[in-house]
Image (cartoon, rainbow, N blue to C red):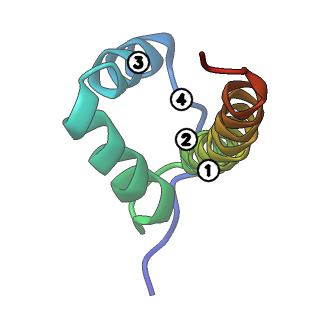
Amino acid sequence: MTEQDNSTVKVGEWILTSIILAIPLVGFIMLFVWGFGSGTKPSKANYCKSVLLLAVIGIVLAIVLSIAGISIFGNLINRINWY
């Protein structure tokens, strides 16, 4: 069993984390590595898990709103009388 490092994450580490997370595919992969990896500090792991959770909520919300918008738009198109 490995011992967790419970020290605080320094400002430089947060800046590096933010830069890495800004890279599209690499950032997404690193969220999983840092969120569920065993050698990550607890505060960074919790941050990555919360970002992943918010991403899932955003994707689900976007899908629901897209379906609703397409449905409303389709209904409006069907009501137009085409001559």
Which residue is more in the foreground, 40 or 81?
Answer: 81
Q: Position of residue 78 (x, y in %)?
A: 70, 34
Q: Quadrant of the C terminus?
A: top right
Q: Quadrant of the N terminus?
A: bottom left
- The residue to which callout 4 is attached is 9
Q: Position of residue 33 (x, y in %)?
A: 34, 57
Q: Secondary structure at mark 2?
A: helix
Q: Amino acid at mark 3?
A: Ser
Q: Between disc 2 and disc 3, whose residue precedes? A: 3
Q: Secondary structure at mark 3?
A: helix
Q: Amino acid at mark 1?
A: Val
Q: Between disc 1 and disc 2, whose residue precedes? A: 2
Marks 2,4: beta carbons within 8 A:
yes
Q: Which mark is residue 56?
A: 1
Q: Mark 2, mark 3: which one is toward the viewer?
A: 3
Q: Between disc 2 and disc 4, whose residue precedes? A: 4
Q: Mark 3, mark 1: which one is toward the viewer?
A: 1
In the image, residue 6 sits, relative to residue 3, either above or below, namely above
Q: Is residue 57 left or right of residue 34?
A: right
- The residue to which callout 3 is attached is 18
Real-space CA distance between mark 3 and mark 1, rounded to the nearest whole angstrom: 19 Å
Marks 4,3: beta carbons within 8 A:
no
Q: Is residue 2 left or right of residue 48?
A: left
Which residue is more in the foreground, 40 or 76?
Answer: 76
| Quadrant of the image occupied by residue 38 | bottom left
